[in-house]
């Protein structure tokens, strides 16, 4: 009887059971194509580092979301950031069909941004993604051009799933302290939103109730710095698509948008990136040494417009591909690209 891989045996005898495989090196993905979901440790690590360079603390956000917590850690600490960090660690990602949801059902036919903004404002939950009924792909923040459908699966960040939440009507008395704490509990979800933390010293509530605020009160207290969020986009027929082909390109520049010419391993995904039209000579890649094409020998001489991103590694392995590609993706404005400097022990 020949030896067979345990995962392949599971796939043969339990075909309806989803397989999740964790591997170390991205080049080994080719050997586990039978798995439904593959998590590569090295690939994930570099991708998270790149995301941190674009949006600081992204790795902390994801770490807290994948760990189960009641959000009560650190509440006795005298440090305010300990209390905020512990309380927000209770947030997790949940999903529910839009038409069956108290949070989202009223936003059927509205734009994604409208639904996301008003559910955060009304219930303190953060809508982050959508999956169509006929699709297996999850659209993260599809934008204002996406119109919500009743059959859509909504993915949101909250302290508890909707089925475990207790809703109070507008007429019921709602404690002032909980009204203040509700946005704070979703501080991680509402990234970049200014929140008043002056009453964080109050003790946390273990209640899973959600106080539905009065719409008239909220409209008067909206911060003037927030622009109006439209119910439907100006062009409602526009769906999520690749708009890069519609953007004008300056033919006089030294770069263009295309796919990396050399993929590091079989199975790596193609991503549209900012690329140089002409490949630089190897001598120009050594930033600490001058050459015939460039006389610069230190960082000041290069006069970088944006701050450089410095990566220290032993060797330039295949995993670095997953670090560089997000930082050079075509959806990032060319003016915001940061120089990437590799410090290698073995170049």
Image (cartoon, rainbow, N blue to C red):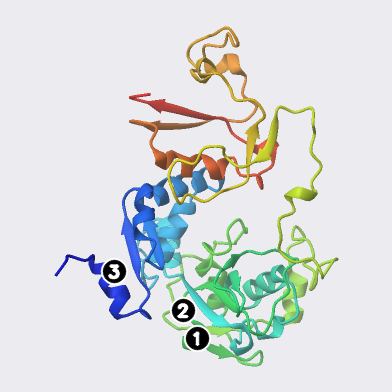
Q: Residue 79: give x, y in percent of width and height.
A: 40, 55
Residue drawn 47% across and 49% down? 268
Q: Tag 3, which secondary structure?
A: helix
The numbered mark at residue 179 is none
Q: Residue 36: give x, y in percent of width and height.
A: 41, 68
Residue drawn 71% across and 60% down? 241
How far apart are labels 1 and 2 at the CA level? Answer: 7 Å
Residue drawn 56% across and 11% down? 296
Q: Residue 287: give x, y in percent of width and height.
A: 50, 17
Task: Work out which quarter of the rendered image holds the C terminus and state it.
Answer: top left
Label 2: which residue? 160
For mark 3, does the 10 Å Cα neighbourhood hold few (<14), some (14 to 19), or many (20 or more) residues?
Answer: some
How many numbered discs? 3
Q: Is residue 86 visible?
A: no
From the viewer's side, name the closer residue of 16 and 194.
16
Report the residue that reaches farthest toward the left.
Answer: 1
The numbered mark at residue 165 is 1
Q: Quadrant of residue 191?
A: bottom right
Q: Quadrant of residue 176?
A: bottom right
For mark 2, does the 10 Å Cα neighbourhood hold few (<14), some (14 to 19), or many (20 or more) residues?
Answer: some
**In the rendered structure, which disc, 3 or 2, sits on the residue that comes first in sequence?**
3
Contact check, label 1 and label 2, Cβ < 8 Å:
yes
From the viewer's side, name the closer residue of 140 and 292.
292
Label 3: which residue? 8
Select label 1 or label 3 by which is in front. 3
Left or right, residue 173 beside residue 282: right
Residue drawn 44% across and 48% down? 266
From the viewer's side, name the closer residue of 220 and 272.
272
**In the rendered structure, which disc, 1 or 2, sits on the residue that comes first in sequence?**
2
How far apart are labels 1 and 3 at the CA level? Answer: 41 Å
């Amino acid at each position: 009887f020949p030896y067979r891989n345990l995962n392949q045996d599971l796939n043969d005898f339990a075909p309806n059971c989803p397989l999740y495989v964790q591997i170390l090196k991205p080049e080994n993905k080719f050997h586990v194509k039978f798995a439904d979901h593959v998590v590569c440790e090295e690939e994930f690590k570099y991708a998270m580092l790149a995301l941190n360079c674009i949006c600081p603390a992204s790795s902390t956000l994801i770490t807290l979301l994948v760990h189960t917590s009641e959000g009560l850690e650190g509440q006795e600490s005298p440090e305010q950031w300990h209390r905020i960090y512990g309380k927000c660690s209770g947030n997790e990602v949940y999903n529910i069909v839009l038409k069956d949801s108290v949070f989202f059902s009223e936003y059927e036919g509205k734009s994604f941004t409208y639904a996301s903004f008003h559910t955060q404002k009304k219930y303190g939950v953060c809508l982050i993604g959508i999956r169509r009924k006929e699709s297996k792909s999850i659209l993260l923040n599809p934008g204002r051009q996406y119109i919500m459908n009743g059959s859509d699966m909504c993915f949101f960040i909250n302290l508890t799933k909707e089925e475990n939440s207790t809703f109070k009507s507008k007429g019921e008395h709602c404690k002032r302290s909980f009204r203040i704490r509700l946005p704070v509990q979703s501080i991680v979800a509402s990234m970049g939103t200014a929140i008043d933390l002056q009453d964080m010293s109050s003790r946390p509530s273990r209640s899973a109730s959600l106080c539905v605020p009065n719409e008239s009160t909220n409209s008067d207290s909206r911060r003037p710095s927030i622009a109006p969020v439209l119910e439907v986009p100006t062009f409602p027929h526009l769906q999520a698509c690749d708009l890069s082909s519609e953007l004008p390109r300056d033919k006089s520049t030294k770069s263009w948008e295309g796919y990396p010419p050399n993929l590091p391993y079989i199975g790596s995904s193609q991503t549209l990136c900012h690329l140089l039209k002409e490949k630089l000579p190897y001598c120009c890649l050594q930033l600490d040494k001058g050459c015939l094409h460039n006389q610069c020998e230190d960082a000041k001489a290069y006069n970088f417009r944006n701050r450089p991103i410095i990566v220290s590694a032993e060797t330039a392995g295949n995993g670095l591909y997953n670090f560089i590609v997000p930082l050079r993706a075509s959806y990032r404005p060319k003016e915001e690209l940061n120089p990437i400097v590799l410090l290698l022990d073995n170049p």
